[in-house]
Amino acid sequence: MSNKREAEHNDKAKTADSSKEEGKSIEEKVLIDKAELDKLKAFTKDAEDYKDKYLRAQAEIDNIRKRFNKEKEEYVKFANEDLLSELLYVIDNFDRAMEHINGTQKVENVIEGIKMIQKEFHRILEARGIERIEALGKEFDPTLHDAVEHVEADEDKDHKIVEEVQAGYMLNGRLLRPAIVKVGKKK
């Protein structure tokens, strides 16, 4: 009977061990040698390092993007600073001309001064890539001209610009503003 009891006792112990094993997670049940465990720990550490580097790089990209947007806003805000600075000299000259008009200056001198101011203003615009569209006497081109009226004209002026109402301008080869014109139409 002692054999029978021993067998029952062993069966109960095995059942208790197997129920303990069932309660354990897979990580607890897997047995690996120390070298394998060390490799896994090293891989885990590397993965954590890579994750940290990734998060830092992502944060740096966000900071660069924010800095770029801020610099872009500043650039747009002050992009015309040089042009406006030059235009202040033109305004100063107009102010001086107005002072002379109120004084005892001759009208011819004031007119000459205004012509000089106009010339300076056009020079500043040309230096910035703005050029006037020559329209008068040219063939009407709807990509450069805006016709507001057709005027009866001789046959040689048919479809040609006979009057410029408002000047048109190009900026570095791109249309900035079309010339507003009157176009000749044969009688």
Image: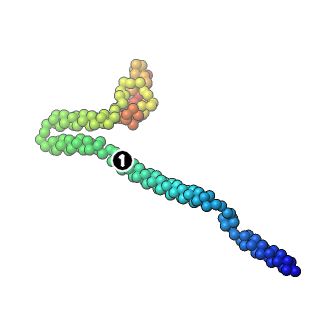
Please say which color scheme the image uses: rainbow
Quadrant including the N terminus? bottom right
Q: Position of residue 118 (x, y in %)?
A: 25, 36
Q: Where, by quadrant of the figure, is residue 129 drawn?
A: top left
Q: Amino acid at mark 1?
A: Tyr
* Looking at the image, residue 135 lies above or below residue 79: above
Residue depicted at x 78% and y 73%: 14
In the image, 103 versus 82, the foreground residue is 82
Residue depicted at x 41% and y 50%: 68
Q: Does residue 19 appear in the picture of this structure?
A: no
* Looking at the image, residue 85 lies above or below residue 58: above
Q: Position of residue 53 (x, y in %)?
A: 49, 55
Q: Where, by quadrant of the figure, is residue 168 drawn?
A: top left
Q: Position of residue 152 (x, y in %)?
A: 41, 25
Q: Residue furthest top?
A: 156
Q: Position of residue 44 (x, y in %)?
A: 57, 58
Left or right of 4 in this view: 185: left
Q: Where, by quadrant of the figure, is residue 94 drawn?
A: top left
Tag 1 residue: 75
Q: Residue furthest left?
A: 104
Q: Residue furthest right?
A: 1
* Looking at the image, residue 2 lies above or below residue 119: below
Left or right of 139 in this view: 43: right
Question: Number of numbered discs present?
Answer: 1
Residue depicted at x 19% and y 34%: 112
In the image, 175 versus 114, the foreground residue is 175
In the image, 53 versus 13, the foreground residue is 13
* Element assignment for label 1: helix
Quadrant including the C terminus? top left
Residue depicted at x 35% and y 28%: 134
